[in-house]
């Protein structure tokens, strides 16, 4: 039973990872990555790491992927434009690097004797046990990660909401319009048109009464 | 018979290789980021597999820390993509070469 679940989850994880890499449309890639995370969570459950599986689904499939999909929707799901230059050498070396890592790990595993897993207590992956480790032995790592997340949040605000390059506009007679002046004029015109449109309406209302 | 640690490590190595090929091959920075996530997750899988093999929980703690770091990395990467988009630059890693030597 465990072997069947392991096989299905592994094939799903590898297939969806291939889809992430091969898809032209970033939107489809992101959806495939959600399936990849679900398959990985299943593998974590098979390894009795319940809390890691839950965090995988909540943090990755939940928060991170929502962020990804938001940015893809903001940028627009456009595919890659074909460049004229052939990239045979780059493709070759990329596949070579991937294959080299694969062969290296397969060789290392083949030579090792990693067969039987240790017998573990039933609360091996429980949130309580993990949390206890986090707040005692690994308190330093915990604090550093929280600091890192704070810095990343600040970086996102700076990158996303940074000042736009100032655009200098000119009037019909060549005078430079100061920043924001155009918007102010547009809103003033809008208010003027709104009041002029509502004026006859109130006029007829008074006439009816 | 349950699959041993070696089986999980093989899956992890395959996923890492797929992600590495994606990072090196794709030109859309969004898909490069997605492939990077695949690589980080494959590392997480082997950490959790080793944690189960040894019987200690330290590998799981490590995997959770990697998740936090990955979230921070995604935030900065997506912030960069949004900044590129606002400056009307082409989202193509081949053409964004003003920092290359």
Image (cartoon, coloured by chain):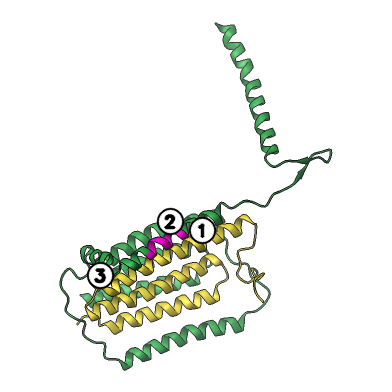
Chain colours: A green, B yellow
Q: Earlier in the sequence, mark 3 or mark 2?
A: 3
* In the depicted structure, whether residue A143 falls above or below residue A115: above
Name the residue furthest bottom: A111
Q: Chain of mark 2?
A: A
Label 1 with label 2: CB-CB less than 8 Å = no
Residue B98: x %, y % from top left: 67, 69
Q: Are marks 3 and 1 on the same chain?
A: yes
Cα distance between the residues tagged 1 and 2: 19 Å
Cα distance between the residues tagged 3 and 1: 32 Å
How crowded pointer 1 is (Cα within 10 Å; few <14, some 14-19, many 20+) is rated as: some
- Magenta-span inclusion, residue A148: yes
Q: Which residue is mark 1?
A: A155
- Magenta-span inclusion, residue A5: no
Residue A39 visible, this orientation: no
Q: Chain of mark 3?
A: A
Residue A123: x %, y % from top left: 17, 68
Tell me which corner region of the image, top left, top right, bottom left or bottom right, holds residue A92.
bottom right
Label number found at residue A66: 2
Nearer the camera: disc 3 or disc 1: 1
| Front residue of B51 and A62 | B51
| Front residue of B16 and A31 | B16
Tell me which corner region of the image, top left, top right, bottom left or bottom right, holds residue A136.
bottom left
Q: Is residue A194 left or right of residue B5?
A: right
Q: Earlier in the sequence, mark 3 or mark 1?
A: 3
How crowded pointer 2 is (Cα within 10 Å; few <14, some 14-19, many 20+) is rated as: some
Magenta part of the chain: A144-151
* In the depicted structure, whether residue B94 falls above or below residue B76: below
Residue A61: x %, y % from top left: 37, 61
Q: Earlier in the sequence, mark 1 or mark 2?
A: 2
Nearer the camera: disc 3 or disc 2: 3
Q: Which residue is mark 3?
A: A49
Residue at left 37%, top 72%? A13
């Amino acid at each position: 039973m465990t072997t069947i679940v392991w096989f299905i989850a592994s094939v799903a994880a590898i297939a969806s990872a291939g889809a992430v890499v091969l898809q032209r449309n970033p939107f489809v890639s992101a959806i495939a990555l959600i399936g990849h995370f679900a398959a990985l969570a299943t593998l974590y459950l098979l390894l009795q790491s319940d809390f890691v599986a839950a965090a995988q689904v909540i943090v990755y499939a939940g928060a991170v992927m929502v962020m990804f999909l938001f940015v893809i929707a903001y940028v627009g799901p456009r595919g890659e434009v074909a460049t004229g230059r052939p990239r045979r050498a780059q493709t070759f070396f990329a596949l070579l690097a991937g294959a080299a890592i694969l062969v290296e790990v397969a060789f290392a595993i083949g030579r090792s004797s990693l067969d039987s897993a240790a017998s573990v207590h039933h609360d091996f992956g429980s949130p309580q046990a993990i949390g206890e480790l986090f707040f005692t032995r690994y308190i330093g790592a915990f604090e550093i990660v929280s600091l890192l997340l704070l810095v990343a949040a600040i970086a996102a605000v700076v990158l996303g909401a940074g000042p736009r390059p100032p655009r200098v506009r000119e009037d019909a007679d060549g005078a430079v319009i100061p920043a924001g002046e155009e918007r102010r004029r547009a809103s003033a015109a809008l208010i003027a048109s709104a009041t002029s449109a509502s004026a006859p309406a109130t006029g007829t209302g008074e006439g009816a009464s | 018979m349950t699959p041993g640690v070696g089986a999980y490590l093989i899956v992890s190595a395959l996923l890492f290789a797929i992600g590495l090929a994606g990072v090196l091959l794709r030109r859309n920075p969004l898909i490069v980021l997605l492939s990077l996530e695949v690589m980080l997750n494959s590392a997480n899988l082997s950490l959790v597999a080793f944690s189960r093999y040894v019987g200690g929980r330290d590998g799981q703690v490590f995997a959770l820390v990697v998740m936090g770091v990955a979230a921070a990395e995604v935030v900065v990467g997506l912030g960069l993509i949004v900044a590129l988009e606002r400056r009307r630059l082409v989202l193509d890693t081949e053409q964004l070469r003003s920092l290359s030597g």
